[in-house]
Amino acid sequence: MVDGLTAIGAGLAVGLSALAAGIAEYGIGSAAIGAIAEKEELFGKGLIFTASPETIVIFGFVIALLILRGGA
Amino acid sequence: MSKTLKFSVVSHIDDAVGILSKLASLGVFHPERTDRLKNDLVFSETEILADLIVKLEHMREELEPYFVGDLQKQKTLPLKDLIEASKSFVDDFSEKVSPVLSQIREAELKKLTLKEDLKMVSNFGANVNFGPLSETKASFISGKMPSKTVKHFRLILSERLPKSILVSGPWEGGWDYVLIGTSEEDTLEGLLSEFTWIPLYLPKMRGTVAEFRDSLLKENQDLDKELISLNASLSGLTKKIYPELIALREMLNNYYQVLSLSKYAKKSEFFTLIEGWTLEKDLSKLKDSLKKIDGVEIFLENFDPKDAPTMPNHPKAVDPFYSIVSLMGPSSQGSIDPTLTVSLFFPLFFGMMLGDIGYGTIMLLLAVVFKKQVDSLFDSLLGKYFSRFSWVLMVSGISSIMFGFFFGEVFGFSITPLFFNRLENIETLLLSAFIIGLIHLNLGFLMKAVEDFQKGLPKLVENLSWILLQIGAFTMFINFNTGLALTLISFVFLLRGDGLESFLMVFILFGNIFSYLRLAAIGLSSVGIALAVNQLAGMAGSARILVLLFGHTLTLIIGIFAPFIQAMRLHLIEFFTKFYEVGKRVFSPLKLTYKYSGGELKW
């Protein structure tokens, strides 16, 4: 029972954070592509803004690892 | 970045060309448009030069394939002589070379037509006789129709147009070719519209197909001989005139570039004003060169460092990594060129994430092949970009192989690691990523501190306070009071510098540090995928090899793409934001070419 709940908790940590990052990147990415199409020099900045929300998933991943290692 | 300075040159109007010429020849002058005077400086020769350059470039394109040999440097001609020489060259070309070129083109066109005719003739049986058709003076109409309708068509044709001649035979795909000779075209067209009919281009054939083919082959041979003789004659002409053409074109280009500089210059009644930039180290060379002209005054101008064009100064060996730096745009004046640091940390990050001997080796091989292809295919800016990119991939591939040995991984299979196994030592991996992140970020703060060193103590202290803040925060885990004291001291300096905004920045800083945990996370996910592929292959029985091939190809694609993006992101977001200030433009001095011509420009 505890093992199952631990796994669900770890899954939620990664899954929900990935979902949040996806939603954030959807808006930023499409705006960035639009901007780059207008002005190619904005590629660097476009990439920066698009990649920014990914950190949330890394946090989720680390939390999931901690949950799994703690629960083992 | 190399420091640039803005300066202006004031001279007598008669010396303007000499000044522009000297500035262009030195190769250290980046021109800047000035609006301090209103009247433009105009040279009448500019248009003539542009016209001649276009003509000579066209001739070069025509002759280049025929030239074999070495090109010798020629002495630069004075402008007037050069214009005369170029005009006379253009006339000679029209008189001697153009007719030969036209003959070659005509013969080549004929050869193409012959080739098409031969291809068409090969569709007919050798014994088909076109004699009756070629003997009539009637129109010759050719096409194809479905085989099953030909018999009916022949019958109708003999009824409606009894004087016409028809030759037909099997064509490909259930069709027959049909050739009709008639003097009543309109009636024939009406008749053809009642049948399925697709017109075909056919040469006007004579005799039997075999005879006609022989005549075409003979004509082809004659054309080959003619082309050999024409090409030999053109090669001879090219050998004589091509070196002169190339030298003239280069001289014209150099004179044109100097005269085009006039768009940056302005004039009053007696004086001209030219403004521009040069590297700090080249200023004395530039001054010495201009002082040789009487009455020239050089003034250093005040400028906003953010407006100054900058030039990267990194070792040539690490130049491919500048393509990552340049994604941020050129840096502003006084910013440190981070290319060397990027060349160390980018492969480190990439290798740590991919970390597999097998994937690293394939990636290295692919990058080597890609580079060879790119070098042979492109001789352009795009080629240069791809070539740089493949260098980055190669170095990253080598780093991946090294980390593969450290972690003991080959295509997801475990071997004895030099350091530790990633999957079994996740905490160690996370800690390593964390420490690398701390080093990388603080290197960014140190670089900023170096940049700000000249701006005064408060700025320097503020930047070092970010490092002190981290030391304080981590010291709290060992000795709380000491750590707290250090943290508070750093806060005081930070508040002095950035005010309340510093509080927000603290959260961003710790977010940045934890962001480096992706070095471990991406690595673990790539091992995970490789392991999944290996397990699937184990279950696939006889299709094992196929699953392994397909699975690892897919993993390799993800394995290259994800670390590349993530390593780039760690640089662009976490690292560069600590010190890199984006400037507006790159220092690109005007440079004259002296590959095929030598000596000073003479006006």
Image (tube, coloured by chain):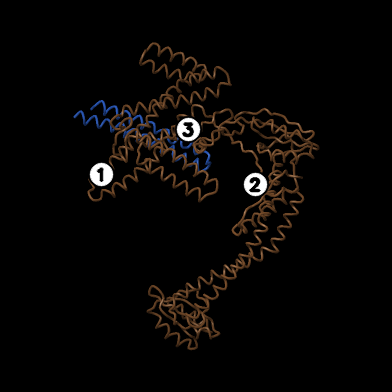
Q: Looking at the image, do the residues carrying marks 1 and 2 touch, with CB atoms under 8 Å apart?
A: no
Q: Looking at the image, do the residues carrying marks 1 and 3 touch, with CB atoms under 8 Å apart?
A: no
The part of the image, by quadrant, that contains residue B238 is bottom right
Tell me the SS state at disc 3. helix
Q: Which residue does the numbered mark 1 point to in the structure image?
A: B536
Amino acid of disc 3: Val
Tags 1 and 2 on a common chain: yes
Q: Locate the C terminus of chain B by quadrant.
A: top right
Q: Earlier in the sequence, mark 1 or mark 3?
A: 3
Mark 1 or 2, which is nearer the eye?
2
Question: x and y percent of residue A9 in the render?
Answer: 27, 30
Q: Chain of mark 3?
A: B
Q: Earlier in the sequence, mark 2 or mark 3?
A: 3
Q: Nearer the viewer, residue B169 or B111?
A: B111
Which labelled disc corresponds to residue B226?
none
Mark 2 or 3, which is nearer the eye?
2
